[in-house]
Amino acid sequence: MKLKRKLTSTVAVAAMSLGLVVVAAAPSSAGVVERLCTNGGLVIGVSTSRLVRTIEDVNCGTVYVRARYGHVGGTSWTSWTWHADMVTQANLPSVDRGEHRATYRTTFTSTP
Amino acid sequence: MTRTIRAWAQLVAGAAGCALLISACQPATEGTWVDLYGADIAQDFKNFEADAPMSDEQVAELADGKVTEAEVNTAFERYRSCLRAEGYELSGVHRNGPFISFGIPGPAVESGVDAVCYASEYVGVDAVWQVLENADAGDRRNFLSECVQQFDIDLTGASAPATMEEMELGIKEAGYSLDDCPTVP
């Protein structure tokens, strides 16, 4: 129940940050990608031009996120940030790709 | 404690096996990591083995069931040296509370070099440090990130991603209290 409440709130925050109306079970929108985990869980990846986020529903294990961003010299990636159930990187410059991963889900990408 | 001693004994036995049969060296078993760090982190270690096996140094750092800041620094420097040896230099290396943040050149990731260096030298230490040893700091990092996003706070001039200190200062300078921030997670 706690996790569900957290997910609902988190998705709402993600939705607000994207200016979208997102329901967890709805098809993915631009910037929001849902993927099933190998043991039946669900993981959500979010990216905007300034933020990337990975949210675990249940049963996906630890989650990680990083972002690719553009700059004068080309592109760079942020370092992996890990957390037990949700992780965000904020104040990023010109994100063009978010990379998301979980213990029971191989890497997937989102685009703002 | 007993679990740690058993895991350490398994590791020592494994190391002895390595000495006798180098080609079949498996310095730590999956079961060892489960005992030390739990099933999820052990599975994370296994996942990253697809990129490269952990170096002996990293295995040694993890073998006692905990990670110290000194070990994090050492493992990070090995990772950085590994990239440097292939011609890639990390940028913007800085502290974010107990964590290390940095930028990785795009070509280092796209060539696969970063994946190999990270898996070999740093991933296990980094994971344990972020997820287990500093779970509270990770919670706070999330809390502040959500708050900055929620209030669309301008952090011009801050690091990318912003550090916890920069986010907290930005929130206060924008006229908010941390009590105003959303309480998720």
Image (tube, rainbow, N blue to C red):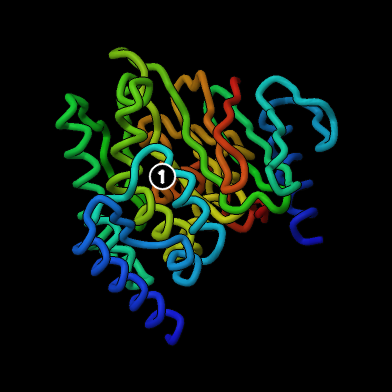
**Label 1: how many Cα within 10 Å (few below 14, some 14–19, many 20+):** some
Q: Is residue B124 above or below residue A12?
A: below
Residue at the bottom extreme? B2
- Which x, y percent locates residue A82? 49, 49
SS class, disc 1: loop
Direction from residue B5 to residue A96 in the image, left or right? right
Looking at the picture, tell me which residue is in the foreground, B88 or A71: B88
Identify which residue, A45 or B163, lies in the foreground.
Answer: A45
Residue drawn at point x = 68 percent, y = 43 percent: A38
Task: Name which quarter of the figure residue B146 lies in.
Answer: top right
Q: In terms of depth relative to the viewer, which is nearer, B90 or A106?
A: A106
Is B87 displayed left or right of A22 in the figure? left
Q: Is residue B75 visible?
A: no
Q: Which residue is mark 1?
A: B49
Q: How many numbered dots are placed on residues in this image? A: 1
Give the quadrant of residue B87.
Answer: top left
Residue closest to the eye, B168 or B4: B4
Residue visible at 42% across and 37% down?
B161
Left or right of B129 in this view: B140: right
Horizontal and vertical percent position of residue B103:
32, 32
Point out the residue furthest to the front here: B21
Which percent across, then down, holds residue B104?
Answer: 32, 30
**Dividing the image into 4 quarters, which one contains the N terminus of chain A?**
bottom right
Tag 1: amino acid? Glu
Chain bearing tag 1 is B
Would residue B151 be visible to someone looking at this image? yes
- Residue B123: where, in percent of width, then height? 37, 48
Query: Residue at 28% of width from left, 55% of height from top?
Result: B25
- Which residue is at a point 69% across and 28% down the rendered structure image? A32
Q: Which quarter shows the C terminus of chain A?
A: top right
